[in-house]
Structure formats: C-alpha cells, structure tokens
Image (cartoon, rainbow, N blue to C red):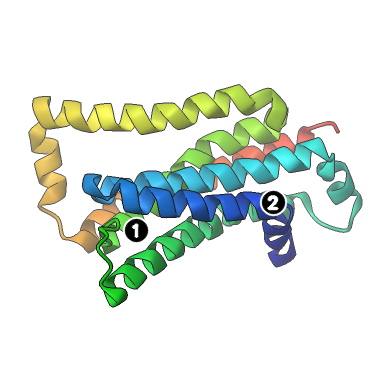
Amino acid sequence: MFHLIKKDLLVQKKSVLLSIVFILFFSLFFSKIGAPGLLIGVLGVTYLLALGSSAIDDKNNSDKMLISLPIKRNTIVLAKYLSVIVFAAFAILINLLIYLVVDILKLPLQPIPFSLTGMAGSIIVSVLYCSISFPVIFKYGFLKSRMINSLLFFLLIFGGSALISYMTENNPRSLFILSSLSNIEAIFVILLPTIFIFVLSYLLSLSFYKNREF
C-alpha cells in the first residue's frame, strides 16, 4: 500500500515541484479571499497530483503491470483513494510552512490564514471531488474520462461558490444553523456524509476495476 502511494509521488516529481510553486503563488497572491483561498489551493494541488498519477498510469499501461503482480486489486484501488489524503495533507503542510516563515521572519506579506475548519474543509472538498471522479477513471481510464473530470473540477469550484451565494441570499437560515455549531461539531456534521460517500465511491471503483478489461 505504502509503496503504491510512494510510486504515485515519484513518477511525477515535476508535478510535485510545480505544485509547490502553485501553492506559493496562491498563498501569497490570493490571501485576501481568506479561508476559501486555502480550500481552492489544496483542491488544485490534489487535482493536479491525483489525476496526474492516473494520467501517467494510463500512458504507461501501469495497470497491466500492477495486476500481473501479486497485488490485490482492492489494494491498488484503496492506495489511489488514500493518496488523495496524502496529496491534500502535503498541500496543507506547504501552506502552513509558508505561513510560519512569513510570521517568524516578519515578512511584509500576507499569506492565507489558517484554521482547523479551513484545513478540514480543504481535505473534505478534495476527498469529495476525487470520490466523484475516481469511479469514472476506474471505469473508462484517465484519457476517456479527462474531459468529464475537468468539467467536474470547475463545476465544484464555481458551482460551490454559486451555491453558497444563493443560500446566503435566499436561505440564510440553513447557513445560520451550521454557523451556530462549534468548529468541531460542524466538521463532524460534514465529515460523516463525506466518509459515507468516500467508502461508497471506493466500492464502486473497485467493482469497475475488477470487471475492467485491460
């Protein structure tokens, strides 16, 4: 399991370096939008690395090699899902390091603010996106599903922003109920459905992968 996740990182060293530059740029130049800046930045890095590893696997026919090894298919699929959390945590860690360096050195910069809610929300949104996109990838492969996943990414970014704006204007009571909860309570209210979707997505992807012909 660990080696499969490590493989997903090693095969895309350039993308990892690019993601650090992306985080640095986003952290320093989009800090004015606050916590949503962290969420979008983490989601962007997760999108880049999670789908990037799938693209490389598809290009190099890695699946054919993996299923010929004594590795269970459920292990291969689970490693992909767990790698999402690793990528999101990596993005959050780099953001945190930037924030600490600016704060300790008293640099005249304003990085993205950090909070438990912001970090948890970033991981949850990244997990939700990959929970939607991975079954499509395991069903059809990366190349055939690339356009669908790109549309899903932009739909999640702009659709989510539009939904929050709509609820703020037309149904503020629902947002008030959520905001009345403590940070920990709000996280758990959102976390439980996310875990359910994550597990359901994994089982669906595993079913597709077991029946897929390579």
Q: Position of residue 68 (x, y in %)?
A: 91, 49
List the residue tagged with mark 2. 12
Q: Which mark is residue 83?
A: none
List the residue tagged with mark 1. 119
Image quadrant where residue 204 sits: top right
Disc 2 marks a residue whose amino acid type is Gln
Image quadrant where residue 79 sits: bottom right
Q: Quadrant of the C terminus?
A: top right
Q: Position of residue 188 (x, y in %)?
A: 30, 57
Residue displayed at 67% across by 57% down = 9
Q: Nearer the viewer, residue 2 or 100?
A: 100
Residue displayed at 41% across by 47% down = 41
Near mark 2 (Cα within 10 A), the count class, few <14, some 14-19 or many ≥20, is some
User: What is the spatial separation of the Cα atoms under label 2 and label 1, in whole angstroms?
Assistant: 24 Å
- Secondary element under disc 2, as helix, strand or loop, is loop
Foreground label between 2 and 1: 2
Vertical order, 149 against 116 (above or below) = above
Residue displayed at 68% across by 55% down = 13
Residue displayed at 56% across by 34% down = 133
Q: Position of residue 103 (x, y in %)?
A: 27, 71
Residue 194 visible in rendering: no
